[in-house]
Every structure is written in C-alpha cells, then in structure tokens.
Amino acid sequence: MSNLPQEDRETRKVVDEFTRLLRQKSKEEREAMLAQARDEALADELAEARQQSEREAAALREKLAYDPAKERDRARETAKSAALLLIMLLLILLLIAAATGRTDILPIPGAQPPQTLRPVLGTATGEFHPDAIRPTFPPGVTPEVDPTFSAYYNDLERFGKQCSIGRPISMGYNSEGVRYQWFERAVLKKMPAGVVDDPSWEIQGELLGREVTTGIDFPTTPPLLSQPGNYNFGETGYTVSGEFLNFWTNCDGLHVLGYPISDPVYEVLTPNKDQKLYLVQYFERGRLEYHQEDPIQPVQFGLLGLIKSQDRNFRANIVMPPKPGVAAVPVVNPPAPPAPASTPLPAATAVPIPAASPTLPAATGYPAP
C-alpha cells in the first residue's frame, strides 16, 4: 500500500488521468486542453485576489471612517433612548397598578407584600372608613338584618352555625352611596351598581382587620408550601393552616375575611379581664380566634364589629415575641394551635377587576338614624 497521504493520492490520480487523456489527443488538442486548464487556474487566482482586495478595502474604509468623538455621541444617544424607554415602561406599570389596585406589580425587595384584594374602589386608598362608627337607635329597638343583606346573611348561616357573623348591632343605612350594616363579627357593605364587574362582590366585608392592625409590624416566618392542611396566599405572603384553613374555606372566607395579613399570633382579647392569651390570625376583613376551652366551636370569628363600634381607636393587643438579647416573658398555659386539616383548599376564586367608575369619597361619619 502506498505511503502517500490520501489527498496526495487523489491528486496523483487526477494528474495521471489528465496525462492519459493528453496522450490520446493530437498535438493541437493537447495544446488547447493545456491552455484551457491554464486559463481556468488563472481565473481562479484572479477571483481570489479580487476578493482579498475587496476585504482589505472594506477594512480600510471602516478604519478611516471611525471617529471616537462620533462614537461617544452615538453611544450617549443610544443610552438616552434606552433610559427613556425604560421610564415609559415603568410609568405604564405604575398606571396599571393604580388602575387595578395591584400594588405588588412592582414589589420592593424585603418589604412585606401589600394588600392586593381590592375588588372595589371604595375610597381613594381602599382603606377602612376611620370615622365610621355605627349609628345609635332608639332604646327598646332591636336591629334586624337589613333586607339588602338578608340573603347573604342567611347563606352564611346555612354553611353552619360557626359561619355566622353574629347579631346585627345597627340598622342598615347609606353613606356616600354605599349601603352598610354592622354586625357583632363583621361590617357588611353593598357597593352601588356598576362599581364592580362581578355581582358576587357587590356585598363584602369592610376592612376591619386592616383597620385595627394599622401600624403593627407582625413577626414573619418563612412561607410554607401549599399542600393539604396548609395554603400559602401569594397575594400577601402569609399561610393559613389547620382548622383556621378549614374555617376560611367553609365560611366564604374570601368575601367575609379576605386574605391573611399575619401569621398566627398570640393576643390578649378584649374584653378579657384575666389577660388570657389566645391564638389568633388576622385577615383583611376580620380575625379568627382559637378557643381551646370550646370543644364544639374552637375556631370563631372575632368580635371586631362589636369592639370597633364601642371603641373607634381600638388596636389589636398582639403579644410580640422577644427581640434577640431580651429575656422572654413566660406564658402560662398558652392555647394549643389548631390541629392539622385534611381538607385541601379549593381552587382560588378569581378577584374581579373593578369597573371604571368615579372613586367614592371617604365617609365622614355615619348618619344619625
């Protein structure tokens, strides 16, 4: 076998074949074939030389055309355009957040997730009416459930006795176009027609939980993964578990309580002469309490409606955990936490987007009956 490389062998074959063909041709034909081969080789060399010259000329033109000052000006203009585009995108996101109430569109790292459940434009800020105290009524008159809220009130009680929001403690009345009625454990309101897209949100609970916890910096823990017995609400970053979760699921928690705004914490409830601690969890529209002394109904709606109607300045009396380096205050017989639940949370209810409508002004006080 020949020791020539493969390419050399192929070249040798071509040369041998060309030589064989030349021997078969006449002298004139051989000269013509040689001339043709010479012309083709020359043409290929000229084409390659032309391409190389064009590349060198293009590189030279680019080098001669480069101007550092112009390049800096061009880079500045490009940066200005990119910055302007970024500002426009941020403004669009802020407008969307303002129109929909989704203040979590541009979250701040490390900050507590804000409230996102605002299906109506109740006030300019979506907050509770701080000056709204239930109206009085003549002695001897027992308030009844207003016809506006009777169907919803009865539906809650059909879910179970534990779902009742208590007796009415005010007559139904209108304030700034919104129909209100106070109950022992909640304040219901009916929004005017056209304010909300979803009819199921015409009646909802007032933001009592937000109101009585204003300024309280709740302790936080790493969020739990959603699984049977635990559900993490991405809207606020808090988790509801165990019997609290069962109660929230079974008693129309989204409309009456809203999303959680705290983890379970200990609180000295009002009224509570013996200063006993209870395990509670706050939601946007109310509070859940765990009463271990009540084996029939351990989880209950907090009496925020009654308490707030009697004390407009009431704030939650949360017992905060000690800070690092501070001696802890011993707790005598703290309440046991709710037992784990086996019922998973049903599919999340979509929050309706508010219809375009004028913003309702903040209430200045309940009218006299």
Image: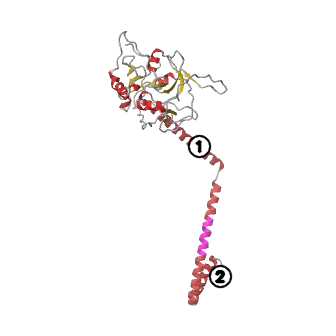
In the rendering, which numbered label is found on residue 186?
none
SS state under label 1: helix
Residue at 46 percent of width and 14 percent of height: 310
Q: Quadrant of residue 249?
A: top left
Say if the magenta span includes residue 187: no
Q: Nearer the viewer, residue 333 or 156?
A: 333
Q: Quadrant of residue 39?
A: bottom right
Q: Amino acid at mark 2?
A: Ser
Residue at 46 percent of width and 17 percent of height: 307
Q: Where in the figure is residue 137, as x and y percent of width and height?
A: 38, 12
Q: Where in the figure is residue 313, as x and y percent of width and height?
A: 50, 17
Q: Which residues are magenta?
A: 42-53
How many marks on residues?
2
Q: Amino acid at mark 1?
A: Ala
State whether residue 192 is above or below residue 310: below
**Quarter of the figure with the C terminus:** top left
Q: CA distance from mark 1 to mark 2?
A: 66 Å
Q: Nearer the viewer, residue 195 or 82?
A: 195
Residue named by callout 1: 79
Residue positioned most to the top: 139
Label 1 or label 2, whichever lies nearer to me, is 2
Q: Where in the figure is residue 154, as x and y percent of width and height?
A: 34, 25
Dominant secondary-structure state across the stretch colored magenta: helix
Residue at 63 percent of width and 24 percent of height: 328
**Are there few (<14), some (14-19), or many (20+) residues within 10 Å of tag 1?**
few
In the rendering, which numbered label is found on residue 2?
2
151 to the left or right of 214: left
Say if the magenta span includes residue 52: yes
